[in-house]
Image: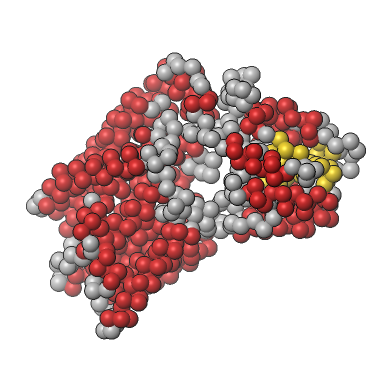
């Protein structure tokens, strides 16, 4: 047995707190809180490798024993969570939503949810936000890793410690190189799939071997562990969901975690991590990770917690996690059964969950058939805007590199039509169908997710490259009739928009700035479907996110600039918000993006402001 380390419990506490704060409404404070999962990966890789090497060294390693321990550690708590989630989904969610949950649970129970979510979720997939088992992707990554890793270590150990170390180092090199290459090409694959995440577990494995020397000087150890803590904290504060992650951007957090673990007890950082409150949270961290997300999802079905009330589901998660640790995790982990019995019991529990999930799918399918009108509306939560937005060509999603932008197709000017240049993020791209429907209009488009159209733009490389090209190359040499700027504006953009418009004025006969859309606390199709399902009238005002003040700030900043400001909010909400098309479809397919029909409704109402006399 390896020695229990309280500082590692403290690291677990840091990891789960980061994840919870990021998931539960505090992502502005900790925009890179998702690195908590990466910390878990390093810890897991270290501990499991330490156990395997110790058993191999003593000549008592057995695959059966290994999987028996994993089954007792992982399965009891997660099986209980699956059961509660399925029951809650069936009774509180729409039929289509519960069907999606049952399918997700099936994949999660088979430890394949990372692949399932990779193939079924995307940039605009609002449904993932309401999937209570989305977080199990990381468990699937770990379990897939531990299918092959013990076998490799066992085989390599026959040739000595050096061969084992080389095997681990070789796997690490292959995985991290694959991750670095894949991130700019397909960030979703690099995020979810085990081959691109394995290197993070292997970082922990690399420091688990006895061959890695340590410093005898306590001062050096203190400095190194402090550097590790700094790397973790800076990653949590400086990274965000728009960062090109994982790949190299995950290296500081994983290296920082490895430094703290490798240096070991005795440092100031280790002592802080060993404080009672940290170790207490660390002990329940697995259950806390399992339960925080379902509790958050179910408590947010009709609108997000805000103004500090996010602490309510967080507090509830702590209580449920303690109960799970005390009455589920601990008793099962300490039970003494033969490995074969533990593995068989684990397999039976997984099979039972998968069977229940399959039965749930059948029941949810029947409910869908009984509520076709509701489901027709709910299905708009899965609306695919890629064709309407010209995704991967003129609109770059978070998975697209700048090389996918097709300048020839997207920036083709017309000699006999009014040229309208549409520049901005996805809140500009959703205007394309409406602008394209204008008579006599030729729309050129330069859009990328997360790229608001302001000078000196910050963000991902594709944002900077695309905006710099449009503002400093294309527009100065190709004057357009109308330049449309639109984005999911923030309060900071009000300071930048005037400077941007003043700079761009010589390059367009007219500049039009679209203000913020009406944003909802949840997906509009879900809200509308729930109102139909519950037979209650829909009141948009009860579900709106207060963002009108940002539009007013931008409007004030543009005063006297010569630019035309269009209040998207007032255009669609005067006084009641337009939520249906004439054919009975939602005008927005998530919290705020317009469908193609919704886009045409908006533009038809403001088309006079988009005309220039030639």
Q: Nearer the viewer, residue 201 or 509?
A: 509
Residue 515 is situated, as x and y percent measured from the top left of the image, at 66, 38
Q: Nearer the viewer, residue 323 or 343?
A: 323
Q: Nearer the viewer, residue 336 or 415?
A: 415
Name the image quarter holding the C terminus: top right
Residue 586 vs 27, above or below: the answer is above
Q: Which residue, as the protein is rendered here, is positioned at the far bottom?
A: 217
**Number of numbered markers:** 0
Residue 16 is situated, as x and y percent measured from the top left of the image, at 32, 53
Left/right of residue 495 with respect to residue 166 in the rendered view: right
Residue drawn 19% across and 42% down?
323
Residue drawn 69% across and 42% down?
556
Q: Quadrant of residue 552?
A: top right
Q: Nearer the viewer, residue 223 or 134?
A: 223
Residue 408 is situated, as x and y percent measured from the top left of the image, at 77, 51
Residue drawn 49% across and 37% down?
126
Q: Could you tell me if residue 541 is visible in this image?
A: yes
Residue 400 vs 316, above or below: the answer is below
């Amino acid at each position: 047995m390896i020695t229990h380390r309280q500082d590692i419990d403290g690291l677990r506490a840091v990891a789960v707190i980061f994840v919870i704060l990021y998931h539960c409404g505090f992502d502005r404070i900790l925009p890179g809180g998702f690195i908590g999962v990466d910390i878990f990966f390093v810890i897991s890789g270290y501990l499991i490798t330490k156990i395997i090497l110790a058993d191999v060294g003593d000549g008592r390693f057995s695959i059966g024993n290994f999987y028996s321990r994993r089954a007792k550690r992982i399965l009891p708590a997660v099986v209980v969570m699956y059961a509660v989630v399925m029951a809650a989904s069936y009774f509180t969610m729409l039929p289509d939503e519960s069907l999606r949950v049952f399918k997700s649970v099936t994949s999660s129970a088979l430890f394949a949810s990372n692949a399932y979510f990779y193939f079924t979720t995307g940039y605009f997939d609002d449904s993932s936000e309401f999937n209570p088992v989305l977080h199990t992707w990381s468990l699937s990554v770990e379990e897939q890793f531990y299918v092959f890793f013990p076998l490799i270590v066992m085989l390599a150990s026959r040739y000595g410690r050096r061969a084992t170390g080389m095997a681990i180092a070789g796997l690490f090199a292959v995985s991290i190189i694959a991750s670095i290459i894949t991130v700019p090409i397909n960030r979703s694959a690099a995020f979810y799939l085990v081959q691109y995440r394995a290197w993070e577990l292997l970082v922990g494995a690399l420091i688990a071997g006895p061959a890695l020397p340590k410093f005898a000087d306590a001062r050096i150890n203190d400095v190194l562990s402090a550097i590790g803590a700094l790397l973790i904290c800076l990653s949590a504060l400086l990274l965000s969901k728009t960062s090109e992650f994982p790949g190299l951007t995950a290296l500081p957090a994983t290296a920082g975690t490895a430094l703290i673990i490798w240096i070991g007890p005795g440092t100031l950082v280790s002592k802080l991590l060993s404080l009672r409150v940290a170790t207490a949270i660390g002990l329940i961290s697995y259950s806390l990770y399992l339960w925080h997300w379902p509790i958050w999802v179910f408590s947010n079905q009709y609108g997000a917690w805000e103004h500090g009330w996010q602490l309510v589901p967080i507090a509830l998660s702590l209580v449920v996690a303690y109960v799970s640790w005390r009455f589920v995790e601990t008793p099962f982990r300490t039970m003494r059964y033969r490995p074969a019995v533990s593995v068989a019991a684990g397999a039976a529990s997984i099979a039972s969950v998968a069977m229940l999930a399959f039965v749930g799918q059948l029941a949810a399918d029947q409910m869908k058939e009984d509520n076709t009108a509701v489901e027709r509306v709910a299905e708009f939560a899965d609306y695919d805007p890629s064709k309407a937005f010209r995704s991967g060509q003129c609109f770059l999603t978070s998975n697209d590199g700048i090389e996918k932008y097709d300048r020839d197709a997207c920036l083709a000017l017309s000699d006999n039509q009014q040229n309208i240049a549409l520049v901005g993020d996805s809140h500009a791209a959703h205007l394309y169908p409406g602008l394209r429907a204008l008579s006599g209009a030729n729309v050129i488009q330069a859009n990328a997710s997360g790229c608001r159209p302001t000078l000196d733009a910050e963000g991902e490389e594709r944002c900077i490259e695309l905006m710099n090209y449009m503002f400093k190359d294309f527009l100065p040499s190709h004057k357009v009739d109308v330049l449309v700027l639109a984005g999911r504006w923030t309060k900071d953009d009000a300071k930048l928009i005037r400077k941007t418009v003043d700079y761009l004025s010589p390059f367009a006969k007219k500049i039009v700035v679209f203000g913020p859309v009406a944003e909802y606390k949840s997906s509009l199709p879900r809200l509308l479907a729930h109102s139909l399902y519950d037979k209650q009238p829909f009141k948009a005002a009860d579900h709106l996110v207060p963002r009108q003040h940002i539009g007013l700030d931008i409007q004030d900043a543009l005063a006297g600039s010569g630019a035309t400001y269009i209040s998207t909010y007032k255009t669609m909400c005067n006084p009641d918000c337009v939520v249906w098309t004439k054919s009975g479809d939602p005008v927005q397919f998530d919290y705020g993006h317009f469908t193609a029909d919704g886009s045409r409704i908006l533009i038809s109402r403001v088309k006079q402001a988009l005309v220039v006399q030639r």
